[in-house]
Image (cartoon, grey):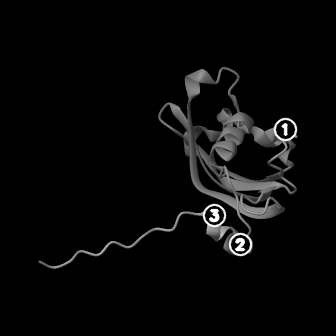
């Protein structure tokens, strides 16, 4: 599986652009907290190219994840997508001339996943809990 994350710098010389289209098992995320699950593959696509002394990756990714609804505490499946993810790396800092995309991709996904989820369309139990929430009062100004 490691091979799908490799970007070979020597293939990008002379203005070449590498098209990326992959679908990978989510195990590379190494999520073990028990509140976040990735039941299906993570698909990503985009391009890799060189700009001066930098490797530039422009990616879009999508998958679904499972978490517990913040209202009813049921396990729910939610869509996740990340559009226009840019990753840059100085070519000097890639001594092997093979850039490993796994860690930057993992970091981007885990930083962008929402901390809380709610049943799609709004949790039906929300109406039962409204009595415990503070209601906003409407202030009106009297004309003088």
From the image, tell me which residue sits under label 3: 132
| CA distance separating discs 2 and 3 | 9 Å
* Whether residue 44 can be seen here: yes
Locate residue 56, reporting x and y percent: 56, 41
Residue marked by disc 2:
128
User: Would you name the residue on which mark 1 appears?
Assistant: 32
Mark 3 Cα-neighbour bin, 10 Å: few <14, some 14–19, many ≥20 = few
**Residue 87 located left or right of residue 120:** left
Instruction: Specify few, some or many for label 2: CA neighbours under 10 Å numbering under 14, 14-19, or 20 or more.
Output: few
**N-terminal of the two: label 1 or label 3?**
1
Relative height, residue 118 to residue 142 (above, below): above
Q: Is residue 61 left or right of residue 90?
A: right
Label 1 element class: loop
The residue that appears at 59% across and 37% down in the rendered structure is 13
Residue 74: image quadrant is bottom right
Residue 16 image label = none
Q: Are marks 2 and 3 in contact (CB under 8 Å)?
A: no
Contact? badges 2 and 1 (CB < 8 Å): no
Q: Which image quadrant: the C terminus?
A: bottom left
Mark 2 or mark 1: which comes first in sequence?
1
Q: Residue most toward the left?
A: 144
């Amino acid at each position: 599986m490691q091979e799908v994350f490799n970007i070979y710098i020597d293939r990008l010389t002379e203005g070449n652009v590498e098209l990326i289209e992959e679908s990978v098992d989510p195990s590379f995320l190494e999520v073990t907290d028990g509140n976040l699950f990735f039941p299906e593959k993570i698909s990503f696509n985009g391009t890799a190219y060189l700009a001066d002394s930098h490797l530039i990756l422009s990616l879009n990714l999508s998958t679904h994840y499972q978490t517990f609804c913040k209202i009813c505490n049921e396990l729910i499946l939610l869509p996740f997508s990340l559009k226009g993810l840019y990753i840059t790396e100085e070519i000097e800092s890639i001594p092997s001339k093979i850039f490993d995309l796994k860690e930057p991709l993992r970091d981007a996904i885990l930083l962008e996943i929402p901390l809380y989820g709610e049943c799609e369309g709004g949790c039906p139990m929300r109406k039962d809990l409204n009595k415990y929430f503070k209601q906003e009062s409407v202030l009106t100004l009297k004309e003088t």
